[in-house]
Structures are given as structure tokens and as C-alpha cells.
């Protein structure tokens, strides 16, 4: 746009329009019969005479012969042959001076030999020449600079951004590890850009408030569980001393469920607040003891109970009381969902696997992962609260093992606890 405006306003006359004059003189300057300089009426010279009313030029050779045309500005008429030794040059004025004529001097090769020519502007430069010259400048200087800057940007920008965002990557990784069971986690503030620091600080402050709220909730649950244990124990004692009848047996089962719920709440709080203590434990003896302790409850609920082991002893680094609580919860779950018929089986295998199976309706495949979530119920009106299986999974997980659910060959659910051979490391949640 700037080039177009300059050309339309006539300012382009100063952009090397003298080239037209020099090109015309290269063909027009010749020798006359006396050896002096003369001009041939070439088409280029005639066109300049027509297009440029104020055309002027002076041509000299090394022998002092001169040929000129037009009205030479007085500023340059007095120069004479003083510039004959100059190969080329532009004569002009400082910016801000009054408007004055400009000129160029150049040594050119003509049919008359090498001569020294001086001329003023040769008219307005054609737009196509301006565009071509502009493109040449762009290709020769501007485009290489742009290309160099683009390459530098493409290489440097990812490096700068990667280094700048390095702290945010670490903060994002920390955020990905945040879980309801992973408390005390905060986003890293090292190398975080200054602009993102307020956001990271706000998130860390929110995490701190969540931790405090969670701790208050856990203290409330533990206090509530402790307070429930005493009246439940009194109620259970009074029912056991009452006259035996089917109704009392059912009440005892309900009270046992309440007592188990209170113990589950306490167990979850204990797991949150302390590490499991590992020692050498005999799996066979532990499972057998749980089966014997819970046999009266299982039989009272309408089941038979069976214990099987394919070896006499299996030693495992474990927390015996925690394993007993996990097995007791699995038996309680079997009592509740086994349909009050058949056998509840506890089996120990030599590959460090424990199975608790019933002959009920089993667990649908789409529920086999979710049943271990806290407070999840397969049936909305289920009498349980969904803590028992979650507690079992946490205990097994902290022993380095895993729990899975399978179908029994003749129907029913089989909960399988698998423990590693290597001793686990005690850890907090």
C-alpha cells in the first residue's frame, strides 16, 4: 500500500528513475565526424524527451568533449569535469532542506567509448519496476530474516515453554496422585511460573481445608463407634440371657450385625491412623480359629459351616488381628447374602490363598469391582451399609495381596484372598 501511494503521488521519481536516462544514453551517445560526442535519435531517448519535459543530462569523455541536453540546474552546471574520475554517485540534499533538484553521476560504456554522464530524474518509475524491486529486496533481505526468525521461534519457543511449564507438569502429576485415601498431598511449587502461583497456592489451601474436614469427620466417626459399642454390648448380653426362641435368635443376629458395624467403623479409623504390624502368622490356624468363633452365628442364621485346608501350616508375614477382622467381615457378608441356606465354606490353599464361599445368588459381573467401594450396596434396600468389603480390601491391600470375586461351581459367590510370598512393608494409607 505504501509503495502504491508513493508511486501514485509521483514520489517514485526519486527511486532510481535516472536508470532510464543512463540506459538510453548507453545506446544514443556516439561520435561525430570530427571525433566529438553526439546523440543518435534512438527510440528510448525520444521517449524520454516526450515523457520527461524537464529532462537534462551532461555527457563528457576523457578528452574534454561534451554533449548535453535540457536545462542543467545551476547547482550542477558549475561542476564541469570535476567529477570525471567518479565511477558513480548520487548528489542531493539533507532531509529538511528546501526542495532542490537531485542528480546522479555514472561512468557508462557507449558506442563512443566510456564516458562520464550526469543527469536528473528520468520521470516516474513504472509500478511494475517498483514491485519487482520491492520483491527483490524482500527475497534478498526481508524473507531470509523472517525465515531465520521463524526457525528461531520454532526451535526456541518449545524449549522456553517446556522449561517454563516444567513446574506445572510436576504440579499436574501431584494433582493426579490426589485421592481420598492419600491425604496431606500438596501441589509442588518448585519452578511454577509466577503467573500460575496464585492458582497453585489456592489449590493447596483448598486441599488443606479438605484434610482438616476429613480429620474432623474421622474423629466424629471414631467417637460415634466407641459410644455405640457399650449399649450394643449391654443389649447383646441381655438377649443372650433371655429365653431362647426364634425371635430372640433373630434379635441376636441383628445385634451382632450392629456390633460388627461399630467394629468396622473403628477398624477403618485404625487403618487410617496407624500402620499394620507384621509378624509370622499361620494362615491355617488363623482361618480355623475364625471359623470356630463364628460357627454359632453361622448356624443360628440357618447355615452350616465348613473349614478346609490342603496343608497343615502356611506361614505368612501378616497382622493376625487385621486378617481375622477381614475374614469375619467376609463371613458376615456370606450370612447376609447367602440366602440363609447351604454351607458357608472357609478354605485355605498352599499357594497362600484363602477362600470364603457361600451357596447364595452370587455377585453379578458388573458389580464385582464396585462392591469394594465404601457404602456401595448391590440392592438399594440392603440391610448392610457397604463398609465390610471395603475394609477387607484395604486390609488385604496393605498386606500386598489382592481380593477377587468368582462364581462357585454349584452357585454362590467365592471371595478369594491372595497373598504374596515376599513379606510386605508396613505402611500408612
Image (cartoon, rainbow, N blue to C red):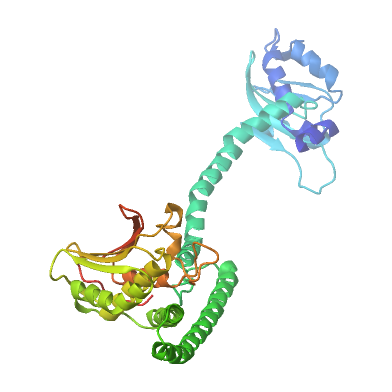
Which residue in the rendered view is the most extreme toward the left? 312
Q: Residue at x 51, y 44 (%)?
A: 151
Say whether residue 281 is left or right of residue 66.
left
Whole-percent x, y for residue 118 in the image: 72, 28
Point out the image quarter for the N terminus: top right
| Depicted 190 relative to depicted 123: above or below | below
Q: Position of residue 190 (x, y in %)?
A: 46, 71
Q: How many marks?
A: 0
**Farthest-out residue, top:** 33
344 is higher (above) or lower (below) than 106: below
Q: Is residue 96 left or right of residue 379?
A: right
One can see residue 76 in this view: yes
Q: Is residue 66 above or below residue 102?
A: above
Q: Quadrant of the C terminus?
A: bottom left
The quadrant holding residue 15 is top right
Q: Residue at x 69, y 20 (%)?
A: 23
Q: Nearer the viewer, residue 148 or 241?
A: 241
Q: Nearer the viewer, residue 40 or 170?
A: 170
What residue is drawn where x is 47% and y is 54%?
Answer: 159
Tell me where residue 309 appears, x and y as whole percent.
18, 66
Instruction: Looking at the picture, tell me which residue is in the foreground, 1 or 429.
Output: 429
Q: Nearer the viewer, residue 194 or 109?
A: 194
Amino acid at each position: 500500500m505504501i509503495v502504491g501511494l508513493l508511486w501514485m503521488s509521483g514520489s517514485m521519481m526519486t527511486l532510481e528513475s535516472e536508470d532510464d536516462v543512463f540506459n538510453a544514453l548507453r545506446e544514443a551517445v556516439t561520435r561525430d565526424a570530427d571525433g566529438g560526442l553526439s546523440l543518435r535519435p534512438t527510440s528510448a531517448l525520444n521517449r524520454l524527451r516526450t515523457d520527461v519535459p524537464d529532462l537534462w543530462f551532461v555527457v563528457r569523455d576523457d578528452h574534454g568533449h561534451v554533449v548535453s541536453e535540457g536545462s542543467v540546474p545551476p547547482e550542477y552546471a558549475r561542476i564541469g569535469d570535476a567529477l570525471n574520475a567518479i565511477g558513480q554517485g548520487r548528489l542531493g540534499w539533507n532531509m529538511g532542506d528546501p526542495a532542490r533538484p537531485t542528480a546522479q553521476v555514472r561512468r557508462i560504456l557507449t558506442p563512443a567509448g566510456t564516458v562520464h554522464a550526469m543527469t536528473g530524474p528520468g520521470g516516474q518509475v513504472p509500478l511494475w519496476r517498483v514491485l519487482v524491486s520491492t520483491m527483490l529486496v524482500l527475497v534478498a533481505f526481508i524473507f531470509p530474516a523472517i525465515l531465520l526468525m521463524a526457525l528461531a521461534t520454532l526451535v526456541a519457543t518449545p524449549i522456553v515453554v517446556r522449561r517454563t511449564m516444567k513446574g506445572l507438569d510436576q504440579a499436574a502429576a501431584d494433582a493426579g496422585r490426589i485421592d481420598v485415601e492419600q491425604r496431606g498431598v500438596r501441589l509442588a511449587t518448585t519452578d511454577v511460573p509466577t503467573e500460575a502461583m496464585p492458582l497453585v497456592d489456592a489449590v493447596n489451601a483448598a486441599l488443606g481445608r479438605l484434610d482438616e474436614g476429613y480429620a474432623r469427620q474421622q474423629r466424629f466417626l471414631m467417637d460415634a463407634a466407641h459410644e455405640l459399642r457399650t449399649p450394643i454390648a449391654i443389649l447383646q448380653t441381655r438377649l443372650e440371657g433371655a429365653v431362647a426362641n426364634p425371635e430372640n435368635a433373630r434379635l441376636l443376629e441383628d445385634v451382632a450385625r450392629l456390633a460388627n458395624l461399630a467394629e468396622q467403623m473403628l477398624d477403618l479409623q485404625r487403618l487410617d491412623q496407624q500402620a499394620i504390624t507384621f509378624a509370622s502368622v499361620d494362615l491355617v490356624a488363623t482361618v480355623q480359629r475364625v471359623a470356630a468363633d463364628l460357627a454359632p452365628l453361622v448356624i443360628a442364621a440357618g447355615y452350616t459351616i465348613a473349614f478346609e485346608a490342603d496343608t497343615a501350616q502356611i506361614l505368612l508375614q501378616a497382622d493376625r488381628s487385621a486378617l481375622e477382622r477381614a475374614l469375619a467381615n467376609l463371613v458376615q457378608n456370606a450370612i447376609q447374602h447367602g440366602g440363609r441356606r447351604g454351607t458357608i465354606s472357609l478354605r485355605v490353599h498352599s499357594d497362600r490363598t484363602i477362600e470364603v464361599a457361600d451357596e447364595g445368588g452370587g455377585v453379578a459381573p458388573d458389580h464385582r469391582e464396585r462392591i469394594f467401594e465404601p457404602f456401595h450396596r448391590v440392592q438399594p434396600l440392603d440391610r448392610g451399609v457397604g463398609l465390610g468389603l471395603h475394609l477387607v480390601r484395604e486390609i488385604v491391600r496393605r498386606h500386598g495381596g489382592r481380593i477377587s470375586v468368582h462364581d462357585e461351581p454349584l452357585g454362590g459367590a467365592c471371595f478369594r484372598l491372595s497373598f504374596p510370598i515376599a513379606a510386605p512393608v508396613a505402611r500408612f494409607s
